[in-house]
Image (cartoon, rainbow, N blue to C red):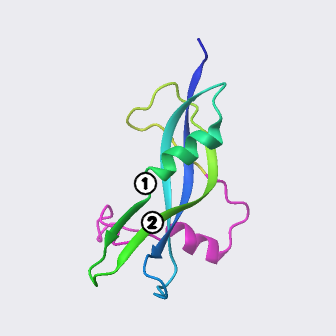
Amino acid sequence: MAETMWYSARLLYESVAVEQGRDNDPLFEEKLIVFIAGENDDIVTKVTSLAKRDEIQYENALGYDIRWEFREILEVQEIMSEAIEEGTEVFFRFWHDPTARDFQSMRQTHGDKWWIDENSHA
């Protein structure tokens, strides 16, 4: 039996207005998923198939149809643990000689940092 391993993939999606001639501000989503693959599996085909499952279309609050389209695989990493469980590292990134702008980018989130007690941040 072929050995299987867990992987993480960082994916890029774009929000697209469905109506012809309708301009919208560019909006992209970076998403991290985990998946399992065998040593003989085509990783790109598998990740692309998983990513396309998350392409959705809906009507936004203004009544316009919006579609989230998968754009590209940004990165794939092997997860070194044999099983996924609480605390398993699924993604890492090294920053060589980061600038102040890099640190700002590292800390940027899409919403409030609800997991940080406002009285305890450094």
x and y percent of residue 53 in the render?
Answer: 44, 49
x and y percent of residue 74 in the render?
Answer: 63, 56
Amino acid, disc 1: Asp
x and y percent of residue 92 in the render?
Answer: 58, 49
The structure residue drawn at horizontal position 26% and vertical position 80%, both measured from the top left corner, is 61
Gap between marks 2 and 1 measured at Cα: 8 Å
Circle 2 is placed at which residue position? 68
The image quarter containing residue 97 is bottom right
* Above or below for 31 versus 108: above
* Above or below for 76 versus 7: below
Question: Main SS of the magenta segment?
Answer: loop
Marks 2 and 1 close (CB-CB < 8 Å): yes
The structure residue drawn at horizontal position 43% and vertical position 54%, both measured from the top left corner, is 54
Circle 1 is placed at which residue position? 54
> Secondary structure under badge 2?
strand
The structure residue drawn at horizontal position 68% and vertical position 67%, both measured from the top left corner, is 98
The image quarter containing residue 121 is bottom left
Amino acid, disc 2: Trp
Range of the magenta residues? 93-122
Question: 10 Å neighbourhood of mark 1: few (<14), some, or many (≥20)?
Answer: few
